[in-house]
Amino acid sequence: MSPAIGGTLNRVDGRAKVRGDARYSAEVPLTGLVHAVLVNATVASGRITSIDTAEAERADGVLAVFTHRNLDPVASVPKLLPSLAGLAAPGQTFFPMQDDAVHYSGQPIAIVVADTVERADHAGTLIRVEYATTPAITLLDQARDEAYVPERIFGGLLPGHGSRGDVAKALAEAEVCVDATYRFAPNHHNPIEPSASTAVWEDVDRLTIYDSTQGPNATQFTVAALLGLPPISIRVVSHAVGGSFGSKAMIWHHPALAALAARQVGRPVRLALTREQMFTSCGHREEQEQRITIGAGADGRITALRHHKLSLTSRFDDWAEPSLQSPAVAYSSPHYEGTYHLIRGNTITPTFMRAPGEATGMFALECAMDELAERIGIDPLELRLRNYSETDPESGHPWSSTGLKECYQRASELFGWRDRESRPRREGQWLIGSGMASALYPVTQPVNPQRARARLYNDGTAVVEAGVSEFGTGVFTAMTQVAADALGLPVERVRFVGGSSDLPNVTAAVGSAGTSAVGSAVHIAATQLRDELIGRAVADAHSPLHGADPGAVAVQDGRMVLRDRPDVGETYADMMARTLTPDAEVLGTWTPPPQDAGYGVHTFGAQMAEVAVDADLGVVRVRRMVGVFAPGRVLNRKTAHSQLMGGMLWGLGQALMEATRMDPRSGRWANASLGDYLVAVNADAPDVVVDTIEVHDEVVNPLGMKGVGEIGVVGAAAAIANAVHHATGRRQYELPITLEKLL
Amino acid sequence: MRPVSYSRAFDVGTAVGAVSADPESTFLAGGTTQIDLLRIYVEQPRRLIDINDLPLNRVEELPDGGLRLGGLARMSDVAEAPELVRRYPMVAESLLLGASPQLRNMATIAGNLLQRVRCGYFRDTEAACNKRVPGSGCSALDGINRGHAVLGTSDNCIATHPSDLAVALVALDAVVQTEGPGGARSIPIDDFFLLPGQTPEREHPLAHGELVTGIDLPPAPVAATSRYIKIRDRESYEFALASVAVAIAVDGGRITEVRLALGGVATKPWRARAAERELDGAPATTESFTRAAAAELAPAVSHGMNAFKIELARRTIVRALEQMTQREVAA
């Protein structure tokens, strides 16, 4: 029996999803279900002076209309803490519909509940609202003089400022200096499934919420705090989630609003956000600008790096996606200084979006590196190698594992980087160029113990459970493989069950750490269960394994055997039948190592891209992308490949098309639809080559997994922008690179 | 969506009668744009008359050697009609470069011509828009207008006509066949699309209840050498930033006949008559093409973010003409 880990097991939920049998949170059939629709503020700042719901209340099918005047207030709003912490994780510390204040356009100001979603939606348009508006800030350019340096960002997890050495002196003394500012349009996640919550009160203190979330427990704890209920009163179920990219990583208002409305109307309530509401209801990647200053010797060795970021946050929270963290350790630089600057504006608090921080921060660094290579006249890859850091430049600790040099080497071979001409090639109207970038993504550890339960039945089948939700990453499939290998069972005899807060607690699947967090717990639970059953066998006088050293026993295909005499042994099922045992069960707990365990922990990779730029029309076509990554243990080569490739194409979209446009006159997004907010489509996708470098990591977790969900994004946009420069001689300082920038 | 009643019609007379008798009713064909507009309250009819069962879905030969495209023929079917592909390749190309395969399978030819603009302010019922609410103002003039028109604009509206197909059709002098309460009539396509002027809410000369039954393509041997090129922000499912429909005949290095129309840059599908005049009889050289493009864009007006479209349109015209007269490398 070959191991399941590292294989290409098809998605265990694939059949149900393809057949349309998978139940998403807005599809759970319930008796007596009614529908809630949110009504949103149409101004960005001010106060509601009157809100007339009479006509809406009279409309056909309407059960209730809630505003700040009649919705039950929330008990408390927990503090903003990234859901990786495993606690309550509200997306922002403001909860709407508590008073008449409007802080951002799209803020919920009313809920209509009706018998159909169409009738609720229509009744919403019959509500008459008047506002006393006040001036709003929705763009950086409106309030640059109001920028401040926050003490901490990112829910308090990271400092607003960091330094080592004396960067000013080192920059002044540098032989070569690159100083560049990069601007980034706001981006929205746009998963295919808009967020939805269905709330059912079984009793006054028993609530079930079907929620589209990256963390059922995060929803449970957050709603518990908001409603003033103990966690035991709330069960959160998440059978299937149609993608997230960070939009469902934090807990926004809709689950609690659905629960409040359901309690007041006395019926199960479904609240599904519309596509347009997805642009104002679950955060986004904030508008930002980053200035990078690199000082180097004439040989390209970096002596100083200064990295400043200016971004727009909400009125309530000091949020910035952590763009400075990976660039700070990407290369050996003795002198460093990084500072976040924030401007408060009339927006929902921004949030995680796939490769939060790295997608922008590494774009800035890697474009500046390309400029440095050009300045001193060496190959961009050679510049990276000269600045490769054998240790974590911040702590001086060794890396837990790297593989970065091997990634460069392999990407270079696959791409044919050596054949790259220093001057671009021309094919008719097309200017052909190529570019590269390094990829770094931190390995973040859950703060708290992670749990999973493994149960073996006496027919030799096993069920393994943990609370993690499946939002398209393939985690249920990978967990089936992990459990199968640990138990010595074929994957067909193992079922993984997740997606409920009733199951053993794991943290929200965020930060590319979801699979490693739950995988470590599943591995430990299943391994302990196997060891327990081996222990019973060797202690049982009727077992052929009686008296054997447990360490000498292996399990193959459900049969416990002596490692060096595989003919001696018995199956789990035989032993359990003989001993009248219906099942055996273990709760496994993995305690993650502390983040600072004496190692630098990052995932590394290398990206290369070839573009063709229409010399006259400015159209950019990406022709080839090569990404090579060292993500530690790969559980499923097929789903990992999909994740990495999807990440690279995400980077392509970031580079060339993704932008939410703010109209500062109204404070509203001007393109809040999938027709107007462009994401890459198949026709844009080039030839994408993905490969991995094997690295063994004994530090991060028992299976040595470092995560594949986000590293594929990092550096992809920079490789494309650098290729555009190579093709055209024009540096790109603003994303997305739309064609007018190249006319 | 506002509550709406729905019924089906099985013959043209009944359909026309039903809609023309009720000012709050409208036809429903493929629905690929209309249903969106109903859902966002931009269009609020009380009654929908589904016309998908009317026998208007064929591509037929006309006695004069032209082709008639049925008003209810689906974009995908028309794009694959062999005689259309052979005689009017730019029409087939304009269809295949529009929308997405799923939308093309649903959307009809008449619906394509009658589709509403993509201006974000037209679609946002909170914003001022003269097309949606006459007299309310135009938010696009100094707003997010990167996709907006530079030709045929007025102080009341700068929304771009979104159709690709219509661009090829105006180049061919197609004729729109209609059936209305007053009977049948034929409308030359260039008269079918109205400039916004002072009445941007009025986009075509159809009476309420008048149905587009078909589009006639007149015989045009030059159209056998034609193409449609479209420049856009992504390679599928996206409207044009600039597009060109061109049919051209060259003899002895001189242009003997040319049809040229622009999309993505104008408030209506834009027949490039100024360029055609420059090109007629001129040598088929880049110099001629450049001069023609400049002549066509001379009256263009930018509104800020869309300034690049003027240069993009010029270059796209030159590119299209070069591609028709020279060989180029495809990416």
Image: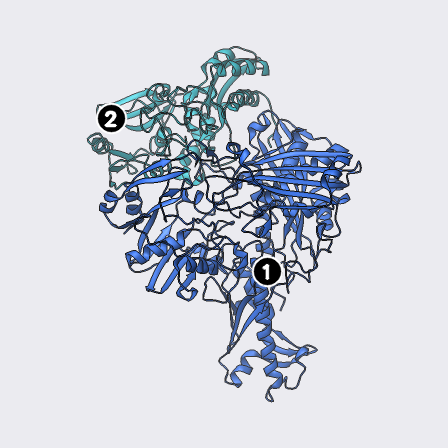
Chain colours: A blue, B cyan
> Any mark on residue B180, and which?
2
Q: Residue at x 50, y 59 (%)?
A: A87
Q: Position of residue A53 (x, y in %)?
A: 26, 44
Q: Between A285 and A324, which is closer to the camera in this rendering?
A: A324
Q: Position of residue B37 (x, y in %)?
A: 34, 36
Q: Is residue A104 visible?
A: yes
Crowdedness of circle 1 by 10 Å Cα count: few (<14), some, many (20+)?
many
Asked which secondary structure carries label 1, the reply is helix
User: Residue farthest to the right?
Assistant: A299
Q: Against A265, is A176 above or below?
A: above
Q: Between A715 and A9, which is closer to the camera in this rendering?
A: A715
On screen, residue B145 versus residue A41, left or right, reads right
**In this view, the mark in front (1 or 2):** 1
Q: Position of residue A635 (x, y in %)?
A: 60, 60
CA gap, disc 1 and disc 2:
67 Å
Q: Quadrant of residue B152?
A: top left
- Three-letter residue code for mark 2: Gly
Q: Residue at x 58, y 42 (%)?
A: A149
- Three-letter residue code for mark 1: Ser
The N terminus of chain A: image quadrant: bottom right
Q: Against B230, is A325 above or below?
A: below
> Any mark on residue B228, and which?
none
The C terminus of chain A: image quadrant: top right
- Which residue has dot 1 on it? A516
User: Residue farthest to the bottom?
Assistant: A541
Q: Between B93 and B267, which is closer to the camera in this rendering?
A: B267
What is the chain letter for disc 1? A
